[in-house]
Image: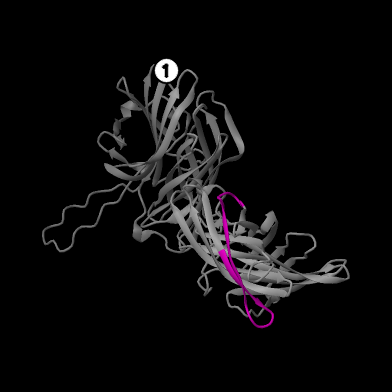
Amino acid sequence: MIAFTAMIPLAGCGGSSGGPQSPGNTSPEPPQKPINTSLADLKYSQSFVNDASTASTTLDLTTKTAISASSSGSTLTIRYDAGSQGYTVSVDGRSQTFTPADISAGSSASGTETLYQKTDGTNRDYLTLVKVPFTGNEATQYVGLGFWQRNVVTDARQDTQYTSFTYGLPTGAAAMPRSGTAAFRIDTFGLVSKPGQEPLAFQGQGMFSVDFGAGVFSAETSNTETSLVSGSGIVGGGIDLIAAGHLTSGNQFSGNALYEGQYGSVGGTLDGRFYGPTAQELGASFNANGADGYTVAGSFTGQRDASATPANLTLTNMTQSQLFYTQFTYNMVGQLNWQNAETFTYVPPSSDLYGGQFTVADKVVSNDPNFTIYRKTFSNSYDSQEATLQLYKPGAGNSELALTYASFGHWSTNVRFGTGTQPVDDYFAYGLTTPAKLLSGKTGTGRYAGVLYGTATTATGRFDVKGSSRFNVDFGKQSYSGALAMAGTPAGAGKVDFGSFDFAGTLGYSAAADITRDGQVVGQIRPQFYGPDGEEIAAPFSLQSPENSAAGYAAITGATVAKRQ
């Protein structure tokens, strides 16, 4: 038999608050029910709010490997009885009560965790509750982490139901912060299972960042994995939990989760909430399922850390410096190092273009209120280049498209070519990208609409290009399609309609797609998601309008940004 919880340090605690008395009752009010104020000292019986995930795993005890596995979010109940000092836990049709008489000799002597064991001859139950997070030394006061495992062994087969949950004394909706940012130190624990492989436990620590005003969060932990059979462990880069999403009603949050380990990566979902009188702590549970049977279920708890700086979560509320890797077509990459609202450095994607420091002194008047424009001359030992940098403004102040996470820029200059110079127009996308593969477990569809800007070069001259874009995304199939429609305005009068172009591709980090016109490949677009849930898309593109089009041959380069409708 394989007992997962015996090899994973876990946590547990709980709580909820009593409701107000009904007004207008002339009879004497009944005495208010006492409530617990800390998980460290439970005095009263209480049922606890919680978030839970369950992994169902079948194991071959001969080979000590998984046969099959799946995971999902669960509806769990957990109740503490002050009289017996026991816990009753129920989930997915199974229930068990654990009392002090069931405490195992394997419980922590220091009191950091309590392990209960109980069997009726068929069901073998293990409940682990942790008071001090595995990677910390300070007990949580308002949130707890628990793992409940039920094993049923038949001959050489073990069927296991493994539920990971967080629970406790939640923050009241009225007490939740609605502005500002915060950082929490988090500790995560969980189970990994994949057919043909040994089951693994993972544990780690990291940071949870939240912008209460924008209602968004991100989380990341670096983990170690331990085999539950051989006991061998793996630590190092690439064993991570990544999550991001939105705050929901009251004290809750939910979003996407991505687990990456030695068996690969798998995407799923996460649900959690804040705990304590003023949201001092938090807890969440997550689950993920891969097409190959790769399954993950786990939880994390967190404590607010005033000494830590939360990550930037929106372009409209940047609280610390940020290095953006600017994305161009054909896999070219530059850098925009944001230092503060009026100071940044820009590094173009190729060595023949010069860049450097920009300050408010380099800002010039823009003829389009939706752009901020900078102009500066950069020099080296050979020559000088006067460059203009236009940045599309994020936020509600943009009258065309109010973006929160994504933007784009236009870098224009003239470079030496032979005895003369030639104009260069480079368009790039940048912003707070959705972590690669985070949306791999997302389902449903999304429709995005946006704007595009670019520059066209034809036999008759150069054109400023403007138009619209649309993206239709099928998250379940991890694919997308869309179209670009654009027109050009030359330096003189008149306008040229370049028409519409189609594209389609598969989701993936910086994955490019062909742009087509009447079935002919004419260019490339490189869309990328931005925001905790892929709320926005930004994409540089480059194409050649066919000679038989209404505008004739034109080389067009530009960028588009779009927002989910």
Q: Which residue is mark 1?
A: 156
Quadrant of the image for the C terminus?
bottom left
Q: What type is the residue that disc 1 sits on?
A: Ala
- Residue 145 lies, in percent from the top left, at 41, 40
Q: Residue at point 26% right, 52% down?
A: 18
Q: Nearer the viewer, residue 327 or 12?
A: 327
The stretch in magenta equals 484-511
Q: Quadrant of residue 83?
A: top left
Q: Is residue 136 magenta?
A: no
Q: Nearer the viewer, residue 17 or 459?
A: 459
> Mark 1 falls on what kind of element?
loop
Residue at horizontal 33%, vertical 42%? 75
Q: Is residue 341 visible?
A: no
Residue 499 highlighted magenta (yes or no)? yes
Q: Nearer the viewer, residue 421 or 208?
A: 421
Screen quadrant of the N terminus = top left
Q: Quadrant of residue 70?
A: top left
